[in-house]
Amino acid sequence: MGRFSPCLCFMMLLLLLIFLANAPATQSWGSVGHHITCKIAQPLLSEAAAKAVQKLLSSSAEGDLASICLWADTVRSIYPWSYCLHFANPPGVCNYDYNRDCHNDKGEKDMCVTGAINNYTAQLATYGDFSTAVTYNLTESLMFLSHLMGDIHQPLHLGFINDLGGNRLPVQWYTRQTNLHKVWDLEIIDESLKEFYGLEISAMIEDLRRNITGGWSDEVPTWEGCSKDSLSCPDSYASESISLACEWAYKGVTAGTILGEEYFLSRLPIVEKRLAQGGVRLAATLNRIFSSGVDVYK
Ligand SMILES: [Zn+2]
């Protein structure tokens, strides 16, 4: 990917900021977080996965996976059932349990981020298999999976149910009033872009890529790994997220706490690694999904 021209970058950032200003207040990595995760994933796709992704992306995506990674947030009003698929909320404990935590607010099982990742992974695994009785809209499956793989890595998407993953925990971010969920969805990333990257998202992505092939390279095979015979492993990503939520996001924070430079600088490394892990694992999952099938769409 080439670097953005400063002018184009400024316009993109302006559009993103306008979007963020109008975005719903709850439960999603911000648009920049999803953009980064998908930009990291796409170059890591195998040839077979890249080909399948190209076939499934709509022509308006122009081959860019990142262009569809926010779609799942834009369909909440037309797909109201999908609201609960962006998160799972343990009951005030620092661990995650699928049977206990993966349900919507009516108690319907599997209606949460881990259940949805399992579901869309299984749907995408039918790609090229015309013998299955049920056919899915695999373009939508890809758009959901690409988005939710980002969300599950935002620690507060596995935050406590009593404060809705920090949405009901008001805090002061530097001089502004916000809530803890938004700090982790948006503010830490935005502050990093401001302080270290001159607002250039592409420069932040390049830095994360350098860490994936550099400082984190020893850990990356573990990030990519998944239990035998599984195409995706959302339960372990969810467990990591609630642990990080307790250890870093909620730590030292109560209603009204003022969060500034100390909180930002100590939490930024966690956010950076979660963005990178989301991208690496999205690619690894798509590579597993599309590795076995014969490409009948050639
Ligand atoms: Zn989301």
Image: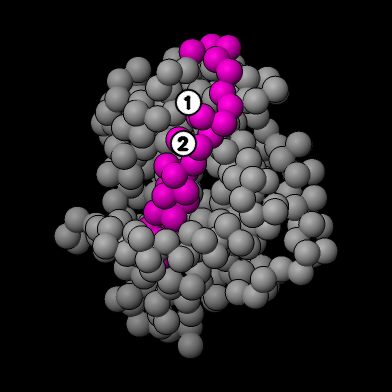
Q: Are marks 2 and 1 in contact (CB under 8 Å)?
A: no
Q: Nearer the viewer, residue 83 or 5?
A: 5
Seen in the picture, residue 193 relative to 124 is either above or below; the reply is above
Q: Find the residue positioned furthest to the left.
A: 228
Q: Crowding at label 1, few (<14), some or many (≥20) Cα neighbours within 10 Å?
A: many
Q: Is residue 202 visible?
A: yes
Q: Is residue 230 left or right of residue 166?
A: left
Asked which secondary structure carries label 1, the reply is loop
At 36% from the left and 34% from the top, the residue drawn is 244
At 46% from the left and 36% from the top, the residue drawn is 267
Q: Is residue 215 left or right of residue 59?
A: left
Where are the magenta residues, as a range? 254-283
Mark 2, ligand 1, within 8 Å: the answer is no
Seen in the picture, residue 144 relative to 181 is either above or below; the reply is below
Q: Quadrant of residue 190?
A: top right
Please state the horizontal and vertical placement of residue 194, each as a whole percent of the image.
Answer: 67, 46
Please state the horizontal and vertical placement of residue 295, each as a whole percent of the image.
Answer: 41, 83
At 54% from the left and 65% from the top, the residue drawn is 206
Q: Which residue is mark 1?
A: 165
Q: Please, what is the three-letter code of the amino acid marked with disc 1? A: Gly
At 48% from the left and 73% from the top, the residue drawn is 43
Q: Which residue is mark 2?
A: 267
Please state the horizontal and vertical placement of residue 34, each as a whole percent of the image.
Answer: 56, 51
271 falls in the magenta region: yes
Q: Please, what is the three-letter code of the amino acid marked with disc 2? A: Arg
